[in-house]
Each structure stands twice: as C-alpha cells, then as structure tokens.
Image: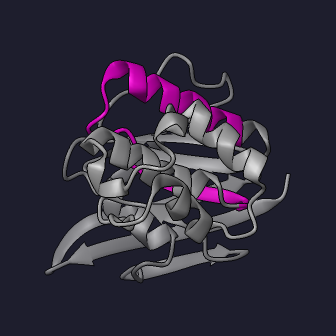
Amino acid sequence: MKLLLKARDVRIEAEEKIILMEVNLEIAEGEFLWLEGKTGAGKSRLLKTLSFGEKPSSGDIVSVKKFPLLAENTRILQNDSVKENLKLAAPLADILDTSELLNALGLFEKRNQKAYSLSAGEKNLLKLATFLILENELVFLDEPFARMDAETKLRAFKTILEKNRKNTAVLIASAGACPGEAPVKTRKLTLKDGKLYEE
C-alpha cells in the first residue's frame, strides 16, 4: 500500500506544557483509523499538526501532500444553499455524485435550502459533505458527529465508510468509542497521558 503520511517522534507543547510526546504514526492509502481520547487529551491538536495546521515542537512529519481537516471551526456559507456549498467545495464534482452524497446524508430534500435555516446537526452534516465530496487520498475528521442524534450519526458514519471503501484513508478523532459498524481492519488508536497507543 502507498504510504501517505509518516509522523516520527512528534512532540507537541503549548505554554511550556507537554501536550503530546513521542508520537509515531504511519497512514497508508485506504486505511480506516479511529482515534479515541478524553476531552483535552490532545486529539484536535494532533490532527491539526498532522494536517500541517501548526508545527510540532519537535519531530518530523512527512506527507505526500497537505490533506484536509474537518474541525470544529470549519465554516460553511450560511447564505448559500446546501448544493451551492458543495459546488463551491468541489466545482468539478459530478452532479450525480453530489446528489448521491446528499441523499446518503439525508440532505437531498433540503438541497435548495439556505445553510442558515438548517439545524445544528444538519449544518455539521453539510460540513462533512463538503469534505466527502472532495477527491483526496486522506481526510482528517475531528469530532464529525457533534450535535447529531444516534440515527443521524449512524447515517453519517456509513457515508464515511463508503468513502473509505473507495480507497480514501480516513482518520476520525472522537471522545467516544469506535462504533461496532467499523471495518474489521480498523486501526484503533488512543491518546492517554500525552502518548499515542494502538491496539
């Protein structure tokens, strides 16, 4: 498998406090990774660093390119419609692919609605859609199921899995446990006491 990203001996500090230390991680094409950790464990900071949103205090990160990160501060255009937000995210995306994605996420019937009229959970679905419509070898998703009920979360998770089946590597960071619907070959990672562990 093609290696997409390699982090070696990565250390992250903030205000003279060690957030993460000795992080070693490799991600190859088509892999599915679930990163679990309590609030404040450093999940968001790690994903931001792996996506080159900030530099590590020490260590090396080698990547074939800069990959996108869906984070809490990811924005959508509130005065544009659902389908317009997707069009802006991926101007060359096939209309059929866009329709299938919106249908899978339960947003197709609201495709012409302005984003500001959506519920908080639906807005997060739209944010997720703007990342899943992209053609990338790897995507980082930081708490992608925030403000979603159980049914919506499952729908979103299955849609992410479908993207992964098309050989896009996915790294999800969450305070919750990995769902039972996850692929058998899921790599389960945990952040605890400043260190990264893998089952």
177 or 92, which is in the foreground? 92
Residue at the image position 25 percent from the left and 44 percent from the top: 120
Horizontal and vertical percent for residue 20? Answer: 32, 63
Horizontal and vertical percent for residue 73? Answer: 30, 65
Q: Is 4 drawn above or below residue 29 in the view shown?
A: below
Most distant residue in the right direction: 1
Colouring: one colour
Horizontal and vertical percent for residue 75? Answer: 36, 66
Residue at the image position 73 percent from the left and 54 percent from the top: 28
Q: Relative to 158, is 41 on the left or the right?
A: left
148 or 96, which is in the foreground? 96
Q: Magenta stretch?
A: 135-163
On the image, which quarter does residue 18 sit in? bottom left
Q: Relative to 2, is 125 on the left or the right?
A: left
Q: Relative to 88, is 1 on the left or the right?
A: right
89 or 118, which is in the foreground? 118
Residue at the image position 26 percent from the left and 75 percent from the top: 13
66 or 58, which is in the foreground? 66
On the image, which quarter does residue 74 sit in? bottom left
Q: Is 190 drawn above or below residue 58 in the view shown?
A: above
Asked if residue 150 is among those painted magenta in the image, a careful observer would answer yes
Residue 64 appears anywhere in the view: yes
On the image, which quarter does residue 16 sit in? bottom left
